[in-house]
Amino acid sequence: MIRGLAFLLFALAISAKTPEWDRAHDLYQRTEYAQSLAVLERIPNKGFDEFQLIGRCHLMQGDYKKATESFEKALALAPRDSELHRLLGNAFGRRAELSSVFTAPGYARKAHQYFEQAVALDPNNREAVANLFEYYLEAPGIMGGGIDKAENLVTQISRLDPPAGYHAQAQLERKRDRYEAAEEQLRRAAEMAPRQAGRLIDLARFLADRGRVKESDEEFTAAAHISPDSPQLLFARAETYIRQKRNLKDARRLLERYIASQLTPDDPPREEARALLAKTGN
């Protein structure tokens, strides 16, 4: 009884959120990462919530080493937290992408390990399952990747989010250079979620990559009817125009609207949008 009470008090202690954390989290949600970190640094006795949020801020700022260090401190306080394992997988994955050929394999293996642990701890963690799927799809076999492994996760993705299941199947088909099949899966995803602009954006990007510009623009327009001010749409449409070196004035206007939008951590950072803006010319 005493041991159980002690465990409960410990659990409450690591999960208690302070007004300072609330302020820092609000700043984080508004993508003001430096300001959020400044608030968090002033908290004297940091616990799980503080270390996790510090790690998230560093992750969004692109400081992946500091992100992993903070997430590992949080993990020591909550070793069975699925989302924390997923975040560590993302941080180590980014370190692998940016590291030398000597250090990248070690970071990639850690990313693989953390993604698998995140899914094992919570099979219903949609983002963890999606991250593991993407790892399997893109990583070489020597690093634990493989199309067959990715394919085995499609059923799980479909159970958690049916439209996302079609999208995952489209990624598999595209990886196999089966473009007609990939397009069919993307159209099924859009049909299943007719109010989700993101599904039409996925289809528009795919069509643009296949050189079907008119059809791509039609899907972007359809997405705009659903969510005209969606930052995701503004960024994706501008990025597509710039990549194809067309409609650069429109791309510029879209990016200016994007930069002025109220963004969230799910959106690309403004710095990325400003880099694209520089490619549109005067």
Image: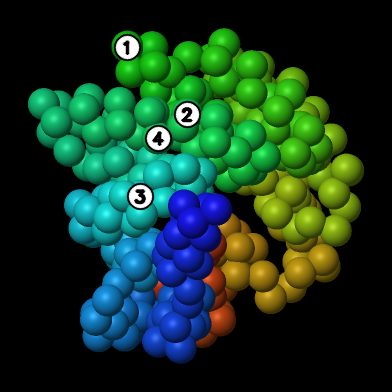
Q: Tell which circle, 1 or 2, labels the residue nearer the N-terminal end.
A: 2
What residue is pinned by disc 2?
116
Q: Tell which circle, 1 or 3, labels the residue nearer the N-terminal end.
A: 3
Q: CA distance from mark 3 to mark 4?
A: 11 Å
Residue name at image x 33 percent, y 18 percent: 143
What residue is pinned by disc 1?
142
Q: CA distance from mark 2 to mark 3?
A: 15 Å
Residue 45 vertical placement versus 35 (above, below) = above
Q: Are marks 2 and 4 in contact (CB under 8 Å)?
A: yes
Residue name at image x 24 percent, y 33 percent: 107
Q: Nearer the viewer, mark 1 or mark 3?
A: 3
Residue 81 percent coordinates (x, y): 48, 47
**Circle 3 residues within 10 Å: few <14, some 14–19, many ≥20:** some
Q: Tell which circle, 2 or 3, labels the residue nearer the N-terminal end.
A: 3
Q: CA distance from mark 1 to mark 2?
A: 16 Å
Who is closer to the viewer here, 165 or 194? Answer: 165
Q: Give the residue type that dot 1 points to.
A: Ile
Residue 14, numbered label: none
What residue is pinned by disc 4?
114
What residue is pinned by disc 3?
75
Q: Nearer the viewer, mark 2 or mark 3?
A: 3
Q: Tell which circle, 3 or 4, labels the residue nearer the N-terminal end.
A: 3
**Figure quadrant of residue 167:** top right
Element class at badge 1: helix
